[in-house]
Amino acid sequence: MTQDPYEILGVSRDASADEIKKAYRRLARQLHPDVNPDPETQDRFKDVSRAYEVLSDPGKRSAYDRGGDVFSQGFGGAGQGFSFTDIMDAFFGGGATAGGQQRGPRSRARRGQDALIRLDVTLADAAFGVTKDLKVDTALRCEACEGQGTAPGTSPTTCETCHGQGEVAVVQRSFLGEIRTLRPCAACRGYGSVIPDPCRECSGDGRIRSRRTLTVKIPAGVDNGTRVQLTGQGEVGPGGGPAGDLYVEIHVEPHKTFTRHGNDLHSTISLPMTAAALGTQLTLPLLEADLPQSEDSETATTYELEIRPGTQSGSEQVIRGFGVPSLRGGRGDLVVSVVVDTPTRLDPRQEELLRELAAIRGEESPDGQVEAPHKSMFGRLRDAFQG
C-alpha cells in the first residue's frame, strides 16, 4: 500500500484545504467501521484518517512536501493514531465540535444572572401605579480593575499548559487505534490565559457585591404575582460581562375595606333594618381616598350611594367604573353588598313598636314559606318540554 497521503485521499499535491477535507469526508463515509465492518476496510479507514491528519495540518504537510518523515510507524500498523477531533472538523467544520460549540479559549466575560425581589405595595398603589425606590444587594462591576479581574498595571498571561488554546489533547486507545479528543485545560479552566496578579478588590472575579438603590415604576393595574422586568438591572457578569435582568414581583397587601376580584372591587356595608326598609343615602369611601391628596386635587374620594327602600340583605349594587384600572385600558366596577342588621336586643318601647308594626302588616304569626330551589336555565327548558 502506498505511503503517499495525496494518493490515499486521491487529491493533487496543490490541492486546497477544502478539497482535502471534501476528499476525506467522502472516503470516511464509505470506509467508516459503522458502515463497513470488513477488517480490510478498517485498515484502509485508518490510512485515510492518518493521511488527513497529515495533510490537514499545515506544519505536517509542509514537512512531508520537503521530504520529511512524518510517519514514524507507517500507515495501517498497530497503534497508529488518528484524530477524532479532525473527523469532527471534517464533518462539522473546522474549529467546531459535534455539539456545534466553538472550540478554543472561552471568554472570561459572561452574562450575569437574573435576580428576583419581592415588593409589597398597597391596593391603591397596585391599582393606580406608584414609583418606588428599591435597595438591592447585587453584584456590581469592580471599579478598581474595570471588570478585568487583574491588579492595576497588569494583564492576563498566556497559559503555559495549553499555550493559549484553552484546551488540551487527551489520547485514548480503542479498537480503531489511538483516539485524540480535546478537553478544557485544567490549568486555566479553558480561558487560555491565567491571571498571575488578581485584583485585590474582587479577587480576580471582576465584580463585587454591593448595595444600590433603584427607582422602579409600577404600572397601574398590577396584581398579586405580577412581575415587572428591569432589563440589565440584575447581577453584572464575571469578567465585566453584561448584567442580567431584575424581576420585581408584586405582592399586594390586604385592604381593610375592599377585596379585589380581577379588576372589580368588592365592599360590604351593614344597614339597620329600618334604613333598609325606608331607604337612605350613604357616603361610601372610594379607593382613591388612600392616595395622597393635594390641595388642588379634584379627584373624588367618596361616592353618594342611594339605598332604595325595601333593600334586601345580600343584595348588590354595582357602581360602574370605580374598580381597578386594567393594564390594557378601561376600569373595573365597584360591587357593594348590603347586609341588613337585625337587632338582637330591644327595650320595651322598641319591642312595643315592632309588635304594633307586625300587627298592622298582619305578621303577628307568620307561617313562613319554603321556596323551591332555584332552577337553572337548562332545568326550566327541560320542564317546558316535559310539560
Image: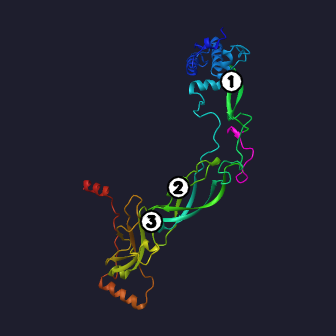
Mark 1–mark 3 Cα distance, whole angstroms, equals 66 Å
Q: Up-down: is 335 above or below 307?
A: above
Q: Quadrant of the C terminus?
A: bottom left
- Helix, strand or loop at label 3? It is helix
Q: Which residue is mark 1?
A: 179
Name the residue: 71% across, 13% down.
Answer: 74
* 187 falls in the magenta region: no
Q: Which residues are magenta?
A: 188-202
Name the residue: 46% across, 73% down.
Answer: 290
Residue 10 vs residue 330: left or right?
A: right
Disc 1 residue type (three-letter):
Ile
Q: Which residue is mark 2?
A: 230
Residue at the extreme bottom: 349
Name the residue: 64% across, 26% down.
Answer: 85
Q: Nearer the viewer, mark 2 or mark 1?
A: 2
Q: Residue 322: x percent and y percent?
A: 38, 68
Q: Which residue is mark 3?
A: 127
Label 2 or label 1, whichever comes before in sequence order: 1
Disc 3 residue type (three-letter):
Ala
Q: Residue 348: x percent and y percent?
A: 42, 91
Name the residue: 36% across, 89% down.
Answer: 353
Q: Residue 296: x percent and y percent?
A: 41, 77
Disc 2 residue type (three-letter):
Leu
Mark 3–mark 2 Cα distance, whole angstroms, equals 20 Å
Label 1 or label 3, whichever comes before in sequence order: 3
- Helix, strand or loop at label 1? It is strand
Q: Up-down: is 372 above or below 105?
A: below
Label 3 or label 2, whichever comes before in sequence order: 3
